[in-house]
Amino acid sequence: MTRGEIKDVILEIIADIDEDADMDGLNADEPLRDQLDLDSMDFLDIVMELRKRYKLQIPEADYPELATLASCINYLEPKLGAITK
């Protein structure tokens, strides 16, 4: 997967979890939870969806790596880079 595809997957998962999320003007370097008003359950839903779709195991200690859109992409790129559609 490319970085752009990973970004699209993250945004798609967020949209599935919160239909009202406004992703226009999303700043890739600002915390997603602050920008999209995601609570801890929403965040866990994102992690669980990544696990379900891509069989990824994301340890709780790594959750801070998923704070921003940019950090999500950086964290997931080596894990999803070999996956092709």
Image: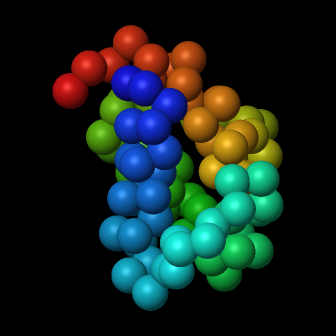
Q: Which residue: 71% across, 41% down? A: 71
Q: Is residue 21 visible?
A: yes
Q: Is residue 63 visible?
A: no
Residue furthest out toward the bottom: 20
- 9 on left or right of 31: left
Question: Residue 70: x percent and y percent?
Answer: 68, 43
Residue furthest out toward the left: 85
- 69 up-or-down from 24: above or below: above
Q: How is the image coloured?
A: rainbow
Residue 33 location, quadrant: bottom right
Question: Residue 48: x percent and y percent?
Answer: 45, 51
Residue furthest out toward the front: 25
Q: How many marks?
A: 0
Q: Which quarter of the figure is the N terminus placed in?
A: top left
Q: Which residue: 43% across, 26% down? A: 2
Residue 50 location, quadrant: top left
Q: Which quarter of the figure is the C terminus placed in?
A: top left
Q: Which residue: 40% across, 48% down? A: 8
Question: Residue 21: x percent and y percent?
Answer: 50, 80
- 69 up-or-down from 40: above or below: above
Q: Which residue: 33% across, 43% down? A: 52
- The residue lying toward the viewer, choosing from 58 and 21, is 21
Question: Residue 13: x percent and y percent?
Answer: 40, 58
